[in-house]
């Protein structure tokens, strides 16, 4: 993939957080245009398409319609597994048929996740993955059998990762549903990772769908995303606690001096 790097300055981040979140479900087109989603106590904003002008494809005539992917808030889950999002793909937007070689769609996008004050995100998970595979092992002259989809996700505390050389500072997870002629059918439909509690994270998501033989086809229908969290002391509370401890220390010193 092309070298793609995105990062936000503090001013842009502050403006985005000040904007009200919209009612959902919303499409990726609406989110890329500047809208955001609230799920439970988390805000999902700064949505960015990282594969300009839409997605990479083996078919140069194929275009990407972000209006065919909807995002719905999952406000349940408490602190663990936490609030999250459900992605649904409509009208075969991420379906591909084999061309006898290697047909593919490669989409990447990112968003920021910010919890309520006093909370920190501590892990990420992906589940509820649905899609389809179509292949005919007995077909002749159709090309090599290989079809499936793969969703890779990177979590970073500073910004979106460079997909050519991804090195997130927090975590990476992936799911896969595919058929490989040599190894049989392969699936990994959920994954998760924990990391150091963070007040705000950036998620870079890469979706690859492919099919080789002319009798092959594959597609992604939907998947879910969760972010668990924990309570952390707010800066004001920490400052008050420090002052209280300092006061206790001073009082103890005065007692020792007075008693001497």
Image: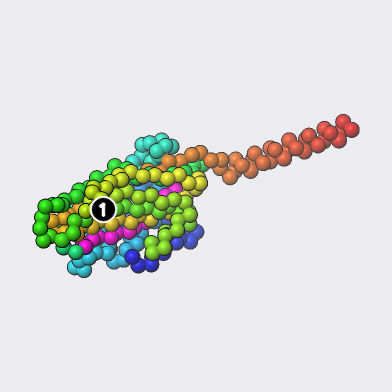
Name the outermost residue toward the left.
140
Q: Nearer the viewer, residue 160 or 152?
A: 152
Q: Is residue 84 left or right of residue 100?
A: right
Q: Is residue 53 left or right of residue 163?
A: left
What residue is rendered at 30% in x and 55% in y?
Answer: 207
Magenta highlight on residue 112: yes
Q: Compared with residue 96, is residue 116 higher up or lower down, i.e. above or below?
A: above
- Is disc 1 placed on a helix, strand or loop? strand
Where in the figure is residue 28, as x and y percent of width and height?
29, 55
Where in the figure is residue 165, as x and y percent of width and height?
41, 63
Residue that carries the numbered disc 1 in the rendered image: 149
What residue is rendered at 33% in x and 43% in y?
Answer: 190
Magenta highlight on residue 135: no
What residue is rendered at 87% in x and 31% in y?
Answer: 259
The magenta region covers: 102-117
Q: Quadrant of the C terminus?
A: top right
Q: Compared with residue 239, is residue 251 higher up or lower down, i.e. above or below?
A: above
Quarter holding residue 168: bottom left
Q: Quadrant of the N terminus?
A: bottom left
Q: Compared with residue 225, is residue 255 higher up or lower down, i.e. above or below?
A: above
Name the outermost residue toward the top.
259
Q: Is residue 90 left or right of residue 43?
A: left
Q: Main secondary structure of the magenta part?
A: strand
Q: Is residue 79 visible?
A: yes
Judge the density around disc 1: few (<14), some (14-19), many (≥20) Cα neighbours within 10 Å.
many
Q: Nearer the viewer, residue 232 or 35?
A: 232
């Amino acid at each position: 993939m092309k070298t793609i790097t995105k990062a936000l300055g503090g001013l842009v981040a502050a403006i985005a957080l000040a904007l009200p979140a919209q009612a959902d479900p919303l499409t990726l087109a609406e989110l890329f245009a500047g809208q955001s989603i609230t799920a439970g106590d988390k805000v999902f904003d700064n949505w960015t398409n990282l594969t300009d002008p839409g997605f990479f494809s083996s078919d140069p005539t194929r275009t990407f319609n972000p209006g065919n992917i909807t995002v719905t808030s999952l406000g349940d889950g408490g602190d663990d597994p936490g609030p999250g999002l459900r992605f649904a793909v409509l009208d075969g937007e991420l379906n591909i048929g084999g061309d006898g070689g290697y047909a593919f769609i490669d989409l990447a996008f990112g968003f920021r996740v910010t919890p309520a004050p006093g909370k920190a995100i501590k892990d990420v998970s992906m589940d509820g993955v649905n899609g389809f595979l179509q292949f005919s092992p007995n077909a002749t002259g159709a090309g090599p059998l290989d079809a499936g989809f793969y969703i890779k996700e990177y979590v970073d505390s500073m910004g979106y990762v460079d997909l050519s050389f991804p090195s997130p500072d927090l975590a990476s997870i992936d799911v896969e549903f595919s058929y490989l002629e040599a190894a049989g059918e392969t699936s990994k439909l959920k994954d998760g990772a924990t990391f150091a509690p963070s007040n705000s994270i950036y998620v870079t998501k890469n979706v690859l769908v492919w099919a080789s033989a002319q009798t092959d086809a594959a597609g992604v229908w939907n998947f879910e995303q969760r972010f668990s969290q924990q309570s952390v002391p707010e800066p004001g509370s920490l400052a008050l606690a420090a002052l209280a401890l300092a006061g206790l220390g001073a009082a103890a010193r005065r007692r020792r001096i007075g008693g001497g």
